[in-house]
Amino acid sequence: MGNLWIGPPGAMTEIDQAAKSFDRSADLGVTEFKSLGGRVTVTRYPNPVRRMKLSWDLLAPAHARVLDRLARRVDGPGPLYVVDPAAGNVLGATQAGGLGVAGSTTVTGLAQWVRTSATGTLAESTAQPGAFVFTAADATSVVAWRCTGTTGNFPVAPGLQVSFRVPAAFAALATVSAGFDFKKADGSYLSSVTAAGPLVGATVPAGAAYLTPVAKPGAAGGPYSLAGACLAYGAVAEAGVPGDGLPPMSVTGYSDSPGRPLPYRSISIDLVEVSGAAG
């Protein structure tokens, strides 16, 4: 398990001191209504919102200053991202399962993936509505995973350890390879890393603010299910790990108390998943 990273893409800071408390519960928005007859009706949010509460005792001054700047939006409104050391897969929950809204071509469905080669086909399974597949037309066909919480690329910072495991249907192929395309802050291409086999690992290079994981079956075939992929930060990607997602977040609460001895500080920070940087 790696350390916690927090901040905007390309400028996330690694905090290697373990938090005194760490609550990552989702806000389910569940409301109960009890009738006169004693029956209970439950309503809830269709999309639970992730919340995080973190606190440290005697945090090092350099890290305390970073959190203070983020809370006060000194360097802009964000968005902020938290690389959660407890998350084993930062792909979206449905994305990791190769699933989505049946018939949808947006990021709730087919647009969770994109073909990055001249050949190959992404489609919804005819046998299982809501499940998505990739067909390789030849050895050059490549499919990529999009971050549904951003403009399409997964936010990173230089020095972060990343790992990607291809879906189970791809992993069974002797010709499969996995890789990363690293992007600059403006989304333009920076560099790539590839590895033969179902697993690739890398250290995010200098100048990178985003990455895109890619998989290449290496031969014509399919349709291959997109279920079972894993993108891990600070750990080795494993098969079958549910997706946690990597949503944009905003600070909603903050406290800063001088510690003993100075200059250490006791810090707590609350964050909530938002739909935009100004949230």
Image (cartoon, helix red, strand yellow):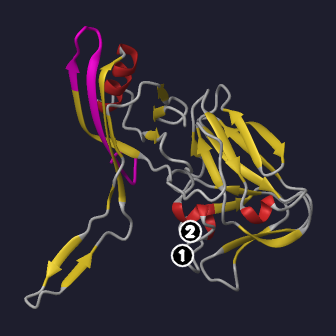
Is residue 188 visible in the rendered image? The answer is: no
Tally the numbered discs.
2
Q: Residue at x 42, y 41 (%)?
A: 79
Which quarter of the rendering shows the N terminus?
A: top right
CB contact under 8 Å: marks 2 and 1: yes
Q: Residues within 10 Å of mark 2 (few under 14, many from 20)?
A: few
- Give the left or right position of residue 169, taking residue 271 as reference: right
Q: Which residue is mark 1?
A: 101
Tell me which label, 2 or 1, sits earlier in the chain.
1
Is residue 262 shown in magenta?
yes
- Give the left or right position of residue 94, taking residue 180 as reference: left
Q: Which residue is mark 2?
A: 106
Q: Position of residue 173 (x, y in %)?
A: 86, 61
Is residue 10 visible in the rendered image? The answer is: yes
In depth, the one of 10 and 197 nearer the eye is: 197
Q: Which residues are magenta?
A: 256-279
Is 22 drawn above or below residue 136 in the view shown?
above
Q: Residue at x 73, y 55 (%)?
A: 166
Is 233 drawn above or below residue 216 in the view shown?
above
Q: Position of residue 179 (x, y in %)?
A: 76, 45
In the rendered image, the residue lying farthest to the left is 36
Please name the amino acid that badge 2 sits on: Thr
Please name the amino acid that badge 1 sits on: Val
Q: Residues within 10 Å of mark 1 (few under 14, many from 20)?
A: some
Is residue 161 shown in magenta?
no
Q: Secondary structure at mark 2?
A: loop
Q: CA distance from mark 2 to mark 1?
A: 9 Å
Q: Position of residue 24 (x, y in %)?
A: 36, 48
Q: Position of residue 65 (x, y in %)?
A: 35, 19
Is 253 drawn above or below residue 123 in the view shown?
above
